[in-house]
Image (cartoon, grey):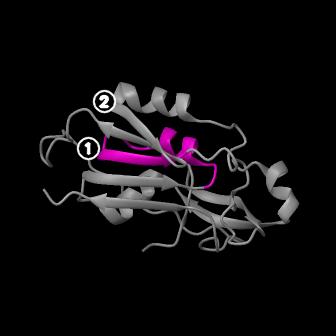
Amino acid sequence: GVNLAIANRSGCLTFARVHDNNNGLSGIASTLDVERARVFGITRINVTAISPHELLTRYYAHVPVLDYASVDVEGAELTIMNAWPFEQWCVNAFTIENNFWCSATRSILPALRAILEPRGYRYERRIWVDEVFVRKTLCPRPGDMGRVGPVAGVTARAAGCIASPTAGGAFQLLPSRG
């Protein structure tokens, strides 16, 4: 796997490491419900984050169709989905964490529906803390998408930022084999 912080934009961001039992409440400070997490104690550190576009460009440049993406980034799910490069990478199914504990805005389901349904996804169901969205029709096969090539170049690590946080969330992709 790749150990990186992911955010809606690439660059240096403040990461809040929450000292709960498994560090699972940690995340990007600007999207975390800091008041709820404060009870455990918080250490703020600067981390280098990359956007979904940069992540996909780096590791999936020649894979425009993904069967599945799991977005579990401790409160930053909505900002990640707003930054998703739908015009370049098509995903057949998403699970997106909608954990009311981590998100300062509480339920993000209405906003997720507003992002995904106009792009051809239907809301299937909630599985524990995850919302499941599936495309109404499968993604077009590579070559049929009218895909624009990914942007070249990678953001350099900013001074004073570590490469990745030590805890908090997961972002998983499953490339299509067809």
Q: Based on the picture, tell me whether residue 155 belongs to the magenta stretch.
A: no
> Which of the image's four quarters has the N terminus?
bottom left
**Where residue 106 sits in the image (x, y, percent)?**
68, 38
Q: Is there CB contact under 8 Å for labels 1 and 2?
A: no
Alpha-carbon span between mark 1 and mark 2:
19 Å
Q: Nearer the viewer, residue 70 or 100?
A: 100
Answer with the quarter of the image where residue 6 lies. Answer: bottom right
Q: In this figure, which residue is indicated by the disc labeled 1?
A: 148
Q: Residue at x 81, y 51 (%)?
A: 36
Q: Is residue 149 left or right of residue 142?
A: right
Q: Residue at x 57, y 43 (%)?
A: 79
**Where residue 178 sits in the image (x, y, percent)?**
12, 56
**Where residue 56 sits in the image (x, y, percent)?**
37, 57
Decide: is 108 above or below 66.
above
Decide: is 138 above or below 169.
above
Task: Read off the magenta span.
Answer: 74-97
Q: In this figure, which residue is indicated by the disc labeled 2?
A: 120
Q: Nearer the viewer, mark 1 or mark 2?
A: 2
Q: Residues within 10 Å of mark 2 (few under 14, many from 20)?
A: some
Q: Residues within 10 Å of mark 1 (few under 14, many from 20)?
A: few
Q: Choose the circle earlier in sequence order: 1 or 2.
A: 2
Q: Amino acid at mark 2?
A: Gly
Q: Is residue 118 left or right of residue 115?
A: left
Decide: is 154 above or below 89.
below
Q: Amino acid at mark 1?
A: Val
Q: Nearer the viewer, residue 44 or 24?
A: 24
Q: Residue at x 35, y 65 (%)?
A: 59
Q: Nearer the viewer, residue 97 or 51?
A: 97
